[in-house]
Image (cartoon, rainbow, N blue to C red):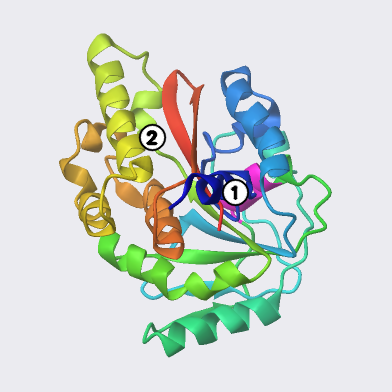
Amino acid sequence: MSGKTEQRRKERQGSIIFISHGGGPWPLLNDPRHENLINFLKNVPATLISPSAILVISAHWEEDSPAIQSNRHPEMLYDYYGFPEESYQITYPAPGQPELAADISAILTRDGIKACLDSDRGFDHGLFVPIKIMYPAATIPCLQLSLLKSLDPAEHIDLGRALRELRQKNILIIGSGSSFHNLRAFREPPTQKTTAWNEAFENWLRDVMTNRQLSEAERERQLTNWFDAPGARYCHPREEHLLPLHVCYGVAEGPADKVIEVEYMERKASMYVWSI
């Protein structure tokens, strides 16, 4: 790739992004521990395309086979508990887009992936927490794609790869999870050892996602075997919050163009943007 081509690529706006969405609804409650994350979510849309629709792969939805939210007017799904009462009054009245849901289902089916439409599923907090901060007007149609209950990283890369033709459409694809997700750790102060694990995994992930010296076969191999990375199981006792990244990578089929690191709840997390 020539220097000029690379520069043009960097100047293009992102159409695929993996975000860390924080702890439950706390970002929408202006929790001071999430200040860095809130600021990131407010500012990042300026670096992204102006989409006609937003597709969110949420860490909070798992099915046996890929499910696509097909409601025209999705309701709210408060899939958390023990939070302040106002967190159960949050609304995000963005419209759905059942036509796009049907298109995505057809795309997956053509690729040999059995998919289904779900007309009952509401917006879970993997969508409404970050998207309400990013796009508060709630005018852009939104829909969600589920993870697979298998939690198989290779299957999630393949799921993303099957959706690669969406890169040609004016759709913003958001993987909503977190590069760090250990609920027990969030309730405890960090120690020298746990901070080292957090930083080691972040360093590994940043290198895998952005190192252009890696072949795509090697990048995919490392992502598939992510649990062998330093600090992996401390950062992800269960991997559902990491797997939206695998789907994003599958769609992009290449290294991320940009990485943004933030700290919230005394832990480091990273976001990845692809400009396609």
Q: Residues within 10 Å of mark 1 (few under 14, many from 20)?
A: few
Q: Is residue 63 visible?
A: no
The answer to whether residue 275 is seen in the rendering is yes
Point 69% across, 29% down: residue: 29
Q: Position of residue 23 (x, y in %)?
A: 52, 34
Front one among 239 and 253: 253
Write down the quadrant of residue 10 in the picture: top right
Q: Position of residue 14 (x, y in %)?
A: 60, 50
Residue plotted at (51% across, 55% down): 58
Residue 165, given in percent of the width and then of the height, sits at 53, 75
Give the x, y percent position of residue 276.
Answer: 55, 58
Q: Which mark is residue 20?
A: none
Q: Nearer the viewer, residue 114 or 185?
A: 114
Q: Nearer the viewer, residue 211 or 198?
A: 211
Amino acid at circle 1: Arg
Q: Earlier in the sequence, mark 1 or mark 2?
A: 1
Q: Is residue 94 above or below residue 68?
A: above
Magenta includes 126? yes
Q: Nearer the viewer, mark 1 or mark 2?
A: 1
Residue visible at 73% across and 41% down in the picture: 46
Going by the numbered disc 2, the residue's amino acid type is Phe
SS class, disc 1:
helix
Q: Is residue 188 magenta?
A: no
Q: Is residue 104 left or right of residue 131?
A: left
Q: Which mark is residue 8?
A: 1
Q: Which residue corresponds to the image point at 64% horizontal and 76% vertical from the top-left?
A: 70
* Element type where label 2 sits in the image: loop
Residue, disc 2: 180
Span highlighted in magenta in the image: 124-131
How far apart are the two marked residues, 1 and 2, measured between alpha carbons?
32 Å
Q: Is residue 52 left or right of residue 256?
A: right
Q: Main secondary structure of the magenta part?
A: helix
